[in-house]
Image (spheres, rainbow, N blue to C red):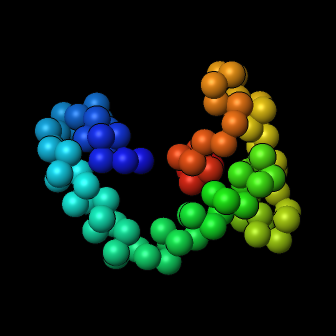
Amino acid sequence: MGARGLQQYAWDNYDLVITKNEAQRQLDTFERQLRQLSEWRRRHAELCRGRRSIRIGAQAAKGIGRVYEFSWNSDPAKRQFDYPQVCNL
């Protein structure tokens, strides 16, 4: 999620008005405070992009779990790599 996305999310879900700069500061703080999580998200996204699927479950790192194929997305525009989806499933 980028600054504009966070700005819209804050409004849509919390009726909170924040500027794009405030949103970017929040994202930068998240990145700094949770560096290992941010790095894992990037590595995981690249792995899923290469596989064209997301493995889901507690033992996904061991190759065990359900598989979600990008091609299963109902929206043709999303039948490809989707970074937020990779991070949230």
- With 43 as the anchor, is 60 left or right in this view? right
- Which residue appears at 57% of the width and 64% of the height? 42
The quadrant where residue 58 appears: bottom right
Question: Tag count in the figure?
Answer: 0
How far across and how far down the image is residue 77, in percent? 63, 25
Q: Is residue 80 above or below residue 57?
A: above
Residue 10 visible, this angle:
no
Residue 89 visible, this angle:
yes
How far across and how far down the image is residue 80, in percent? 69, 36
- With 79 as the anchor, is 64 left or right in this view? right
- Which residue appears at 85% of the width and 63% of the height? 64
- Which residue appears at 83% of the width and 71% of the height? 62
- With 4 as the anchor, is 20 left or right in this view? left
- Which residue appears at 31% of the width and 59% of the height? 27
The quadrant where residue 8 appears: top left
How far across and how far down the image is residue 73, in percent? 70, 29
